[in-house]
Amino acid sequence: MLKDTFNRRSVLTGATALTAAGLLPRSALAQAAHGAGPAATLPARGEFVVRGAQVLTMDDAIGDLPAGDVHVRDGAIVAVAASVNAPGALVIDGKGMICMPGFVDTHLHHWTSVLRPLMRADDPKLTYFPVTAACGVVYTPQDSYRSVMLSLAQSLSAGITTTQNWAHNVRSPAHADAEMGAMRDSGIRGRFAYGNPALHPNDQTIDLADLPRAKRDWVGKDGMLTLGINSRSVDNFNASTRGGISAEMAKKEWGAARDLGLPITMHTSGIGAIKTLNDAGLLGPDVQLVHPLNTTEEDRAALAKHGVSYSTSPVGEAGRTGDIQFVEMIEAGVKMSLSIDHTTTYDCNFFHSMRMLHTCNLHRFGPKNKITMKRLVQLATIDGARDFGFGDKTGSLTPGKRADLILIRATDGNLAPVGEPYNALVMMAQPANVDTVLVDGRILRRNGQFTALDQDKVIREAADAAEGLKSRAKWA
């Protein structure tokens, strides 16, 4: 029997050569580096028609259809109408379904997901910040890949078709490659927000030298994966675990990102961050802030003036100090979007997020609450796409846009019989009602099941990663 003469170096060398030659996807080198194979071979784009669904387009010019068809060809939406003539196209029966754009999540820490077995929401020593700080420093690229893949599988199952991977534990270029490789392999659309390693010294920049390489190697013309940076806070919120930097350090890091045309995102749950950024001349339309709490009227005016957007994660924010200032932001003219945050101590559930935001607004304003159910669904779809700068590409069922859409079973017991569809989505729907998920015209889930991705394998490898992290971090 011939001996196995391959080693890690030969695998990496071969993968590098094939990637450079254009014979392998960019993710192949990352997979070779962290010992993981692709989670799935993505389904081909084809031609099909969703027939007879209740269509919620998020496009004011088209409106909604009580019963209509959506025609997709080669990844693009061709037509949306009461009846579409498409001979030879595959037919997807949409009767009893709500057809709508996929959800757009603008802020999710995918790298933390494998740590959920180590956490408890009722024990301060086992909550998100202490666990991620202790275990984040021992992550390998393989751990990063497996955690991101677990979180992306959950996201797709919940109807999320676009995500911002808020990666604030990029320990090396190999870790960055692993996370971006998982995004490519899953088939989701999204942005990789490159950040610092956990517990990174506040007087040291993130790996600015790797940003051009990451952009060159991973950002393609198809628009499926884009690049940005996430910044440590300038208000010292959770500085012990996530870092708190000066305005001068922010100028250095943000300036490097802007030289490459990369957008910037930053947490701002504390008090004073927006004033600090505004005084330093750092605000601009390429900036997204996260967690709209504890802002002043002057802060909000500065955000609107400079075109800054804000992502709200209502499930987590409802437990923090300060009100969720969604209504105040809208009234000030600040662009808003919706996000999950993380999936360690709560689930990946955009329906719950919309519901929580509605409930918090109702609690604060009572009958004066003017945020409609449709407005909340727009927040979860087209507003998120606009936040990303993807509004011309996705976020609505508009002919010419890419086909990122979901079908929701309106015949399930927790929804049926459906009256006003937006009310049903916000107040009663659950991820389990998501039947079909398409991203860029690829059918990634059908009949509530993945078409290619091996979910059992993803979960098994995530469990192995969690055990390894627990052991290396000496986490009791």
Image: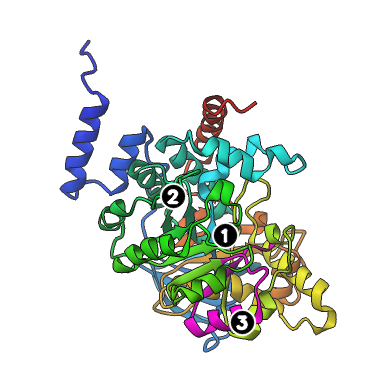
Furthest residue in direction top, as rendered: 1
Percent position (x, y) of residue 368? 81, 84
Q: Nearer the viewer, residue 361 or 25?
A: 361
List x then y, in percent, for residue 44: 36, 56
Q: Are marks 3 and 2 in contact (CB under 8 Å)?
A: no
Q: Residue 366: which quarter of the image?
A: bottom right
First reached walking from the N terminus: tag 3 or tag 2: 2
SS category of the residue bearing label 2: loop
Q: Residue at x 35, y 46 (%)?
A: 177
**Disc 2 and disc 1 in contact, CB within 8 angstroms:** no
What kind of colouring is applied to the model shown?
Answer: rainbow
How busy is the neighbourhood of tag 1: few (under 14 within 10 Å), some, or many (20 plus)?
A: many
Q: Which residue is tagged 3?
A: 298
Query: Magenta residues?
Result: 290-314
Among numbered discs 2 and 1, the one appearing first in the sequence: 1
Sequence order check: which comes first, mark 1 or mark 3? 1
Mark 2 — residue? 196
Instruction: Give the quarter of the image for residue 262.
Output: bottom left
Mark 3 vs mark 2: in front = 3
Residue 159 badge: 1
Q: Given the image, on which type of amino acid does mark 1 rest?
A: Gly
Is residue 293 one of those drawn in magenta?
A: yes
User: In this rendering, is residue 252 above or below 373?
Assistant: above
